[in-house]
Amino acid sequence: MARRTKLTKLTKLAVLPALTLAMALAGCGDGGGETDEGAAGGESNVQLVNEGKLTTCTGLPYKPFQYEEGGDVVGFDVDLVDLVAEDLGVEQEIVDTPFDGIQSGADLNAGKCDLAAAGMTITDVREKNLDFSDPYFEATQALLAKKGSGVTDLASLSGKKLAVQNGTTGFDYAQENAKDVELVNFEDLGLLLTAVETGQVDAGINDNGVLYDWVKEKTDFEVTTEFDTGEEYGIGVKTGNKALLELINKHIAEAKSSGKYDEIYEKWFGKAPESK
Ligand code: ARG
C-alpha cells in the first residue's frame, strides 16, 4: 500500500512514462510491440501508465487528505484510492507534484499518473482539461489568521497580506473578492501555513478541512470565517479514460453504501460525516 512506500523513490519512477510518451509523440519510439502501459488485473480493461501499479498525482502536504508521515504518504484520499488499487490488484504509488500542473490536466496528459487525488475541487474550467469522478467530499474556502489579530474577514485585510496557494480555488476566490489586499502566492499548503505561522503574511486562504486540521495543533491560530463557495472534490483522470473513471465511481458509490466511506472519514476527521 502507499503508506509503506518511500516518496523519494516514487518521484523518480514517474519520470519514465512521461519520457516514453514524449518520445512516442516525437516519433522516436522503436515501433515494436513494447509498451509501458500494463493492463490491470481482474476483468477490468483499465490501462495503467506504470505497469503493476496505480500511480496517483498529488500535491503534498494537504493534511488530512494526503501528507507524509515517517516517509510514507497517508490520508483520506490515499485510503479512498487504495480501494481502487486493491480492486485492480496493484499497489498505489504517489507522485508529489505542484498542484497547478495537476489541476490544469497537464500531468495527466503527460502520463505522469493514472489519476489525480488532491482534495481537488470540481470546476467547469477543469472539466475541460480532465475528467472528474463523482463528488466524494464537500468543502468551502476559509480564512486562517492568528488569534487576536483582528483579521475576521476579507474587508479587515485591507492593506494587508493574504497567502494563497497557486492554482487553487482559494486563489481564484481571493483574486475576485479580496480588494486592496496583497496576495502572496505559495506553491503548496505547507509553505502557505509556514508564512502564516511566522507572520510573513497576515492571513491565509484555503479549504476549510485542511485549515481546521492545522489549528487543532497550532492553537494560537484560528479559522476566522468560511466563505460559502460550495465546493466538491473529485478524483481526476485523463480526458476520455472511461474505464478508470467508471471503476473509481464504482468504488466511491460502494464505499458510501457499505459504510467504508464513513469509516475512512472517521479515521481522518475523528467524527462521522455530516454529509458526503
Ligand atoms: N480544493 C482546492 C482546489 O481544488 C485546493 C486543492 C489543493 N490540493 C492540494 N493537494 N494541494 O483548488
Image (tube, rainbow, N blue to C red):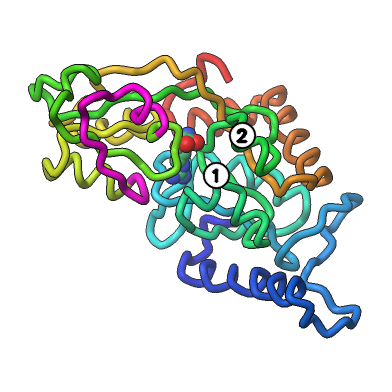
What kind of residue is marked 2?
Answer: Gly
Asked if the stretch drawn in magenta spans residue 67, the answer is no
Q: Position of residue 49 (x, y in %)?
A: 72, 63
Q: Are circles 2 and 1 on residues that touch, CB within 8 Å? A: no
- In depth, the one of 120 and 124 nearer the eye is 124
Picture residue at 83% right of the left edge, 85% below the top: 30
The image quarter in which residue 37 lies: bottom right
Q: Position of residue 18 (x, y in %)?
A: 65, 69
Relative placement, left or right, of 114 versus 15 is: right
Q: Is residue 14 above or below residue 235?
A: below
Q: Which residue is mark 2?
A: 234
Screen quadrant of the C terminus: top right
Outermost residue, left direction?
148
Asked if the stretch drawn in magenta spans residue 185, the answer is yes
Outermost residue, bottom direction?
30
Relative placement, left or right, of 32 versus 179 is: right
Picture residue at 28% right of the left edge, 17% below the top: 225
Picture residue at 16% right of the left edge, 19% below the top: 156
Task: Indicate yes or no: mark 1 CB to ligand 1 under 8 Å.
Answer: yes
Q: Earlier in the sequence, mark 2 or mark 1?
A: 1
In what element is the residue under mark 2? loop
In what element is the residue under mark 1? helix
The image quarter in which residue 126 lies: top right
Picture residue at 47% right of the left edge, 49% below the top: 99
Q: Is residue 12 above or below residue 261?
A: below
Q: Which residue is mark 1?
A: 103
What kind of residue is marked 1?
Answer: Gln
Q: Is residue 226 above or below residue 13?
A: above
| Residue stretch in magenta | 172-189
